[in-house]
Image (cartoon, grey):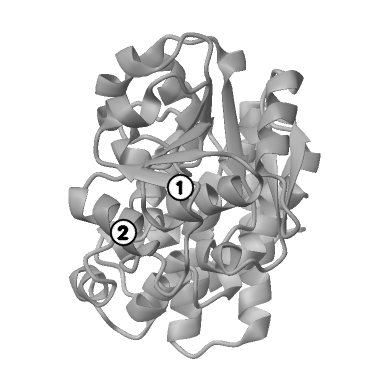
Amino acid sequence: TAAVMGAGAWGTALAKVLADAGNDVRLWARRAEVAEQINTTRRNEEYLPGIELPTRILATPDPATALAGVTTVLLAVPSQQLRANLQPWTSLIVPGATLVSLAKGIELGTLMRMSQVIVDVTGVDHSQVAVVSGPNLASEIAEGQPAATVVACTDSGRAVTVQRSLSTGYFRPYTNADVVGTEIGGACKNVIALACGMANGVGLGENTAAAIITRGLAEIIRLGIALGAHGATLAGLAGVGDLVATCSSPRSRNFAFGHRLGEGETIEQAQTAAHGHVAEGVTSCRSVLALASSYDVEMPLTEAVHGVCHKGLSVDDAIALLLGRSIKPE
């Protein structure tokens, strides 16, 4: 049995993967009506419309029920809400349990990666924390389309256990010991996807998109290496793979949000069009830029996205600033 804490699109999709892989799953939903809908109709229409969920998923609004006796806990709440949610759950988690982060981001204020937040709140050893990240658009995975992901953990045994629990005919997990690189790739790609969406929204084409993705990857690698990540991780699924998927798909919340900004909408208007949801890259660009600054790492694309989202910079002016930077060797 595994617990998935968070019944948004990604949490629900991973609960379905776990069930399809032969596990019983307890899915915690913040709202009781979402849990009731899942249990009675086998649907989560707000987050994964049209997807039938396996009967092995039991949804509950009670965290104690979800966590009772469970030794594998997947944390699927948004990155900036992880600390507040995890604090009251800590006493309910079985000692020695593997805690798996599904969130992608850098915490504002502390500038911690999500695995660091988990350790800080729960007091568990780093080896108990795993991270799942990769080119994983929730709706496609829920539909059973072939996909791959990375399970990163410093404890290879725990990594393999999580890998096996998530392995299905359509979902292929790979293990990795580089937690830092896996998390940095996941946190930064949302910001670059916003930039790609903005460029698409103003009518720019594939050459521009390719340049943003490639130079965005260069920024991610610079920051990752400064933090101790391995370049090979960021050249793989958790880096370039996740970046390509998020930067090119209209199903990507960050790309779609950036597209609306490129079309001239304000943050508030784009949020309304996204049914009240703000893309994680809007917040992440602040914490990623602050983290990069603390390591003296230059991230011009991230800085441009931050300018548009938080400094009143227009998309056209952001593009002009990027093109006007001094030329140099690649």
Quadrant holding the C terminus: bottom right
* Residue depicted at x 30% and y 67%: 46
Taking depth in this image into account, of 252 and 314 the one nearest to the observer is: 252
Q: Is residue 129 above or below residue 311?
A: above
Q: Amino acid at mark 1?
A: Ile
Residue 234 in the image: x percent, y percent? Answer: 72, 45
In this rendering, the label closer to the viewer, 1 or 2: 2
For the residue pair 221 and 17, the one nearer the viewer reads as 17
Residue depicted at x 52% and y 61%: 138
Mark 1 vs mark 2, CA separation in Å: 11 Å
Horizontally, residue 179 falls left or right of residue 233, namely left
Front residue of this view, candidates 277 and 22: 22
Residue carrying label 1: 57
Residue 118, image quadrant: top left
- At numbered mark 1, what does the secondary structure look like: helix, strand or loop? strand
Image point (44%, 65%), residue name: 254
The residue lying toward the viewer, choosing from 300 and 160, is 160
Residue at x-position 69% and y-position 43%? 150
How far from the left and from the top, in percent, is residue 84?
Answer: 25, 29
The residue that label 2 is drawn on is: 40
Along the horizontal axis of the image, is 168 left or right of 106? right
Of callouts 1 and 2, the N-terminal one = 2
How crowded is the residue under tag 1: few (<14 C-alpha within 10 Å), some, or many (20+)?
Answer: many
Please tell me whether mark 2 sits on a helix, a strand or a loop.
helix
Residue 253 x/y as whole percent: 42, 67
Label 2 CA crowd tier, 10 Å (few <14, some 14–19, many 20+): few
